[in-house]
Amino acid sequence: MRRLTVALALLVLLATGCAPARTGTLGPAPAGASPTVSAAPTSAGAGPTPATGAPSRRPPATSPGTTTPAASEEPSPNGTITVQLWFARDGKLVPTRRTLPATLATSRLALTELAAGPSAAEAAAGLTTVVPAGGQVVRIADRVATLALPAGFDAGDAATVRLRRAQVVWTLTQFPTVGRVAFTPGDAAPTGRGAYADLLPAIVVTAPAVGDRLASPVTVTGTAEVFEATVSVRVLDAGGREIGTAFTTAACGSGCRGDYRATVGYRLAATGPGTVEVYEVSARDGRRINVVRIPVLLTAR
């Protein structure tokens, strides 16, 4: 009788312990273990090249509030530092980056660039900022950055104010020393990325950035919350013709956000402008939806 009881208990444990938790990630960059899909160059109009092996669909072991640093506060050997800036487009957060002369005040540098706004190429791609100049980080302690806000920082409608705060939080928390942001000294409720997760579009592209000079093959990274976790990528030439395509699977999909990484090759006779397009294929009618277009410079291949 005792053996029968133990056997039944084991069966119950096996039946209830088989489904992994779908926690997802809010990190701005892939965590390094995301599946990679390589694609051979295709002719215009050809379909995507699928993966040769099925990638793991198990979500990463991070909680939705986890911050994955996208930048180091240490300068590179050539005396520069690359920072990620979170601008806005259509009311959602969009990342880009700047490589600038190194400084010890990396948080101040990031805030200054955020307030300065997008470059001409980024503005042409629809990026904007609602962050005014004058904000200062006055203290970083226990991974909380405290800001002294300029006059008018909280002016405007509620949606604009929230988007403004989200830009600041997502930009500052790329650094390992910052996990949350307090918007005034004495703020009892500093916030992290999770508080603004709903302001992320379905597909976030962290690389390449607008204006990057690319060579084949192109590596595309980001996060996505899409149907069955499937993210599609294609490269277009200056005339909008498809010259390379691939797809990959994010680490988490419908109902949670996961990192993705895809590699796509292309063929191009002469160096010139092009576009990297990242999108989801509609399960309803096969249309491209949640499209993100990144204007870039493509080198001949």
Image: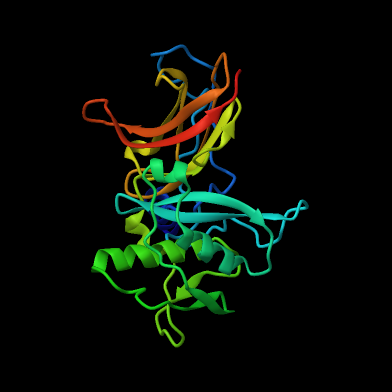
For the rendered model, the colour scheme is rainbow
Which residue sits furthest left?
284
Residue at the spot 56% in from the left edge and 37% down from the top edge: 212
Vertical position of residue 32 compared to residue 40: above or below: below
Q: Position of residue 251 (x, y in %)?
A: 46, 43
Residue at the spot 54% in from the left edge and 41% down from the top edge: 34
Question: What is the quadrant of residue 216 in the picture?
Answer: top right
Vertical position of residue 68 compared to residue 288: above or below: below
Q: Position of residue 24 (x, y in %)?
A: 42, 52
Vertical position of residue 201 compared to residue 239: above or below: below
Q: Nearer the viewer, residue 223 or 94?
A: 94
Q: Can residue 26 be seen here? A: no
Q: Quadrant of the N terminus?
A: bottom left
Which residue sits furthest top?
43
Residue at the spot 29% in from the left edge and 73% down from the top edge: 155
Q: Position of residue 121 (x, y in %)?
A: 46, 41
Q: Position of residue 145 (x, y in %)?
A: 52, 75
Residue at the spot 57% in from the left edge and 69% down from the top edge: 108
